[in-house]
Image (cartoon, rainbow, N blue to C red):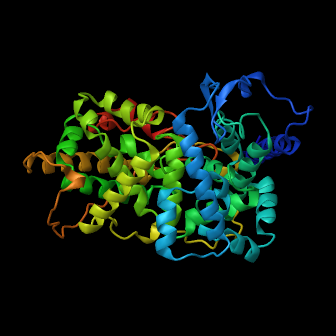
Amino acid sequence: MTDGEQQDALVKRSEEEREEIFRRYELGMDPSNVVDPWENPTFELYFKTDKYGFLHDDRLPETRDAQEVQRTRIEMERDKKWMKMLSHWPPSQDKLHKRVYKGIPDRVRMVVWMNLLNIKQTADSNAGVYARMLQLARKYSTETRQIDADVNRQFRDNLAFRERYNVKQCSLFNVLNAYSIYNSELGYCQGMACVAGVLLLYLNEEEAFWALNTLITDPKYGMHGLFIEGFPKLTRFIDHHDRIMSKIMRKLHKHFTKHNVDALLYAIKWFFVVFVERVPFSLSLRVWDIFMLDGDRVILSMAINILYLHKDELLRLKDMDAIIEYLQVKLHKNFGYSDDEAIQGLERVMKKLKDLKLDVPPPPKSNEFPTRKLGDFVEADMEKKIGRRRNDYTDAEKQVITDVISRQEQNAIEVQSTVSYETSECATVTLTVPEDSHSIRSSLAGTSVASHGSSETMSLEDNNIHLRTANMLQNTPQREMLLGT
């Protein structure tokens, strides 16, 4: 068989695989659609299910406690106020700000998100586009295999996504495939499945598609720079996060540096999916509400807020593994503060950072935004069509080693050059911030760490691969594991 014939055979096999995957989602929950037993988790009706649809490993209580009764009463009162405000949209900015920070009632969240993201107008002005992108995806998408795998593990503890090929799973599959064609420069990155999944808990399929597009392409949110190859926005945000830590939380910053806790170890999922699965879901929704209102500066402030609220416990932990487990696992199960207390803390941090001119990171570069026209179909190259895995490092992957080592060295220098002091930090600290330039790292990782091709996918979070220390990055076997080559 000639090289050309072999390539044709591989392309045909990829096309047949893609069509078979689409066919299964098209069948949905039809009895003729074969589902392997392992794909459907066991279901017990009497598990405790919260109001967001997530299952918990305890039984439903026989009665509601006084706190739950009080929360229900307050939310019902807020329902009335929000319904009145929504009938006279848009309200004044001061009124909207006050109401959003107090909490959007779950029953009106769909409508509020639609308004904040201007979804109806976007969909109306792009009539027929979503359907066309989905048709093209079925014929040409190179991301289908990876999207299928990610849909199968997204929010499986939530009733909306629990059963294989149910309505929401099919919607998530469609949205991600269609978007990989609509924004061909970005394609697909695994964090996008979580973002789209949250949107689909409140919006229908096409609404979620346009909401995802707004979050990715609107400079107010700018998630394109988080998901594109090289993660330029993540680089910029991590740099600014470190700068804030070195200015107003020096003791904790020194503690993290001493134990090799790079911000990459705990902040990737904070920034990529706006704290989902890192804090209780009810709190992450409150942060999402504020993020949609005030934009991406909220993410940096919430990161600092989490560290400030838990700094005493973090300072007591004496090794990297314990610190990372606390931030990635324990806070999700038990945050230690009520949602209202956490959001009040967020407001204080945002105000303090604004006073110190630290609330907004340095401006983005052009590589954080799409350069191709959205919606223009671009056929994939042969390597992606056949799913061939590349054998060499990209420049972005080579740069990740230099970047992380450089940043850790810089952190160590900054810690050594400052005097440790006790302070109430975010609550009281006042500093004069020098106009020094912030460090720029050209990249964090290449396409083999976050998917931009179905055959090249590895997720830092989903596979629990951590950028632990500079020494690990210089170790050849560990570096190969990290970069997915």
Give the total number of marks visible in the rendering.
Answer: 0
Residue 390 visible? no
Q: Nearer the viewer, residue 393 or 106?
A: 106
Residue depicted at x 18% and y 67%? 436
Q: Is residue 477 above or below residue 194?
A: above
Q: Is residue 311 above or below residue 220?
A: above
Q: Is residue 421 left or right of residue 399?
A: left
Q: Nearer the viewer, residue 202 or 144?
A: 202
Q: Is residue 22 left or right of residue 79?
A: right
Q: Is residue 394 left or right of residue 454?
A: left
Residue 72 drawn at (x, y percent): 59, 45
- Quadrant of residue 443 within the rendered picture: bottom left
Residue 376 drawn at (x, y percent): 70, 71
Residue 427 drawn at (x, y percent): 23, 54
Residue that protrudes farthest toward the right in the picture: 32
Quadrant of image for the N terminus? top right
Residue 329 drawn at (x, y percent): 44, 32
Q: Nearer the viewer, residue 137 or 349?
A: 349
Residue depicted at x 9% and y 50%? 418
Residue 124 visible? yes
Residue depicted at x 73% and y 70%? 123
